[in-house]
Image: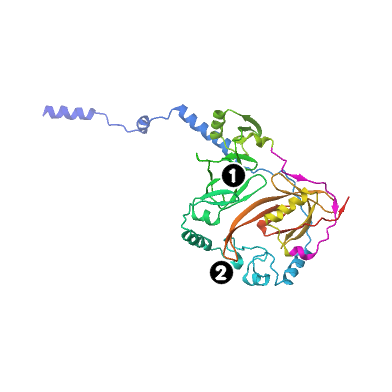
Amino acid sequence: MNRRLSRYRKQENLAAPEYTLNQEKRKRKKIPKWVRNLFAGVIIAGVVLYAPPLIMRPVSTEPVVVLEMDTVAIRAANEYLKDHPDDDFDGDGLANAKEQQAGSDPYRVDTDGDGIMDSSELSLTNTSPIIYNNTLLEITKQQMEAADKSVRSPFKINNVVLWPDNLESRAHGAVVKTLAGYRFCNFQGWVQFPEGSYVYAVEDGIHKELRRSPEGAVYIPKAETGIAVEAYERPLEMIYQFSCCGRPLYISNAVCGEILRFLLPEKGPALFTCRKMATADLDPDTSRGKEISVHTTSTQMDDSRFGRNHILLTDLAQVRRSIEENRPVISSLFSPTRGEAIVLIYGYTSQGDLLAADPETGEGLGKIHIEERASRLYDKEGKILQYEWFLFDGLGFSSYSKDRISFLMESPSVNP
């Protein structure tokens, strides 16, 4: 009995256990302070370096020129098209009246851009000229089977050998000569140039070397709007442009340059940027351009200009040839919805852009940006050929808005 009583008294003296949150907190491991500081520094650096390009937009320094539009030209152009139903303005083998009946564009050989000429869609493939389809892929497959060739079998365009990666590149891939080099459209794969195996993609005047194989072939990556390249026998000298708050500093050391290039964005707006470029980019070659003296000229043009859309590279070459012979070219810029403006083409830049002036005052108006293009085209004779043309954009007119351009190749009367 005494033992039980003493045991009971001992249990009464036992303290009740305490449970607190402080004990649980003590068990958690704290992150070292230097790790937290490093993590915060990385976040701040990322915000400083990469946030400005996302929230800021570069401001164009080029003056915006607004040309006076002749709205009466819209009615004149519509009447001219209506009065010439049997003519073929775009030369695709389909008369204007039939183009309008089918809903296709009388000024474009391939309205839907699927690689089948409008006339071929109606007479050969029995497809719609205004609905994109993959008929050219099927035709390409049939031709490969007949010739016992594969998708990667090489073919040559403009002395450039191409090894396409896929069927789309084989069917639609094209390459066209430019003033400085070449431009690839709808193509992805390996190519080999006659000029050399050191090939550079050119974007905004900056050269970037492309990957090449030991055999001298160069890989052309896929690009939605095409890719401009230049080929050389020897490699270009490369440097690194480090920019701090818009002030450039050039670094020739490859190790330092690659480290900065890895850490920093290549383009602004940003506080710090670093990009690799050729030394030739600092002093671009302007010898390929040409300018002549601007004089006031007579702007009398007949309505036949409404029956043309001079977008072939042969038309562009003729304009440049006229400039080289010191003969300016009168040009009509026409919008089906806004009207027409007449300008005087008095030169072109080393990049191929056209220089325009007011024909009545001789005052310079600015540039018309030119971009050479090429596409594969299934013609009215059932053959696949390369169709070479150009896009233009400037002075309020653009190919993307279905605007048209025409040139008066004859020498205008010049007033000194």
Q: Is residue 143 visible to us here?
A: yes
Q: Quadrant location of residue 85?
A: bottom right
Give the alpha-carbon distance from disc 1 to disc 2, as whole Å.
Answer: 37 Å
* Quarter of the figure with residue 107: bottom right
Which one is in front in this view, the residue at disc 1 or the one at disc 2?
Answer: 1
Q: Is residue 357 left or right of residue 9?
A: right
Q: Residue 166: x percent and y percent?
A: 49, 53
At label 2, which amino acid type do we have?
A: Leu
**Residue at the right extreme, as displayed:** 416
Marks counted in the figure total 2
Of callouts 1 and 2, which one flags the residue occurring earlier in the amino acid sequence? Answer: 2
Residue 212 lies, with reference to residue 167, above or below; the image says above
- Which residue corresponds to the image point at 77% horizontal and 67% vertical from the top-left? 76
Q: Residue at x 53, y 61 (%)?
A: 136
Residue denoted by label 1: 194
Residue reaching furthest to the left: 1
Image: magenta residue range: 284-306
Is residue 290 magenta-colored? yes
In the image, 112: left or right of 9? right
Q: Label 2, secondary structure: give it.
A: loop
Question: In the picture shown, does residue 116 fall above or below 293?
Answer: below
Left or right: 29 as drawn, with respect to 113:
left
Residue found 76% across the figure and 62% down from its top: 305
- What residue does disc 2 label? 124
Closer-to-camera residue (7/262): 262
In depth, the one of 358 and 169 nearer the eye is 169
- Describe the element under mark 1 as helix, strand or loop: loop
Rendered image coloring scheme: rainbow
In this rendering, does residue 44 appear at all? no
Circle 1 Cα neighbour tier, 10 Å, few/some/many (<14 / 14–19 / ≥20): few
Whole-percent x, y for residue 16 in the image: 27, 31
